[in-house]
Image (cartoon, helix red, strand yellow):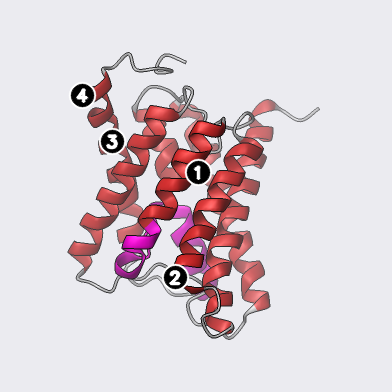
Amino acid sequence: MIDTNLRDGLAEAVGTFALVLAGTGAIIFNDVSGGIIGHLGVALTFGLIVMTVIHAIGDRSGAHINPAVTIAFAVAGRFPWRRVPLYVVAQTVGGILASLLLLWYAPTHQTLGMTLPTVDPLQALVMEILLTLFLMFVILSTAHGAQERGITAALAIGGVVALEAIFAGPITGASMNPARSIAPAIAAGNFVHQWIYIVGPVLGAALAVPLAWGIFGRSMEGLAE
């Protein structure tokens, strides 16, 4: 029998694999095809895959598929800190495997869907903090404990991801997710400015916790689960 923790870790790895494969794959194939998918198509791809993954594994692992989300759930007291390393490792490995697969499909693509800022690094950092703060705020207000599950969570969270990718994608790539950024960086062997996409999302997600408490109170739904 597979241990419950291992099942959750496998679910997070598969979910993040799907996120990186579809999302960064859309970026790569858009470049290869001469722009057929377009910026809007790429943004919607990210939102739709997040929505789909929440439906698929939300009842199993909570469908965090993002180290920043897992850490913020732990900060909020909804998720045990002892389980954070398992989730973060699983998410990162899942993302890397997806990027390596995409490298096989597009070996000459220079960035493999990396997130790269087109503005000053400090401006990019602030934007990533704000994007992830708002994303995590929506997650906290719709999730059941530490689980993103159900149609409401899927629509709200997937919608926020798509929305933020539409308007902020040209500025920072709208990562909001260290695993989503680290994976293609490793596959491409290019780590320039990647610190932005680790520090920004983790800090932004953590800051969403006191914001949610300030608006809804510390006893907001699911907090004690």
Name the amino acid, label 4. Gly
Task: Tally the numbered discs.
Answer: 4
What crowding class fits label 3: few (fewer than 14 Cα within 10 Å), some (14-19), or many (20 or more)? many
**Mark sitting earlier along the chain (3/4):** 3
Residue that carries the numbered disc 3 in the rendered image? 208
Q: Which mark is residue 214?
A: 4
Q: Position of residue 15 (x, y in %)?
A: 61, 47
Residue 183 falls inside the magenta stretch: yes
Q: Position of residue 76 (x, y in %)?
A: 35, 26
Q: Quadrant of the N terminus?
A: top right
State the CA–CA distance, disc 2 to disc 3. Answer: 28 Å
Residue numbers of the magenta segment: 165-188
Q: Which mark is residue 88?
A: 1
Name the amino acid, label 3. Ala
Residue that carries the numbered disc 2 in the rendered image? 39
147 vs 191, nearest the viewer: 147
Q: Seen in the image, is 112 located left or right of residue 17? A: left
Label 2 or label 4, whichever lies nearer to me, is 2
Q: Establish if 189 lies above or below 160.
A: below
**Mark sitting earlier along the chain (2/3):** 2
Residues at discs 3 and 4 in contact (Cβ within 8 Å): no
State the CA–CA distance, disc 2 to disc 4. Answer: 35 Å
208 vs 168, nearest the viewer: 168
What crowding class fits label 2: few (fewer than 14 Cα within 10 Å), some (14-19), or many (20 or more)? some
Secondary structure, magenta segment, majority class: helix
Q: Which mark is residue 77?
A: none
**Mark sitting earlier along the chain (2/4):** 2
Label 2 or label 3, whichever lies nearer to me, is 2
Residue 134 falls inside the magenta stretch: no
Name the amino acid, label 2. His
Label 3 or label 1, whichever lies nearer to me, is 3
Please tell me which residue is depicted at 54% across the width and 48% down the height of the picture: 50
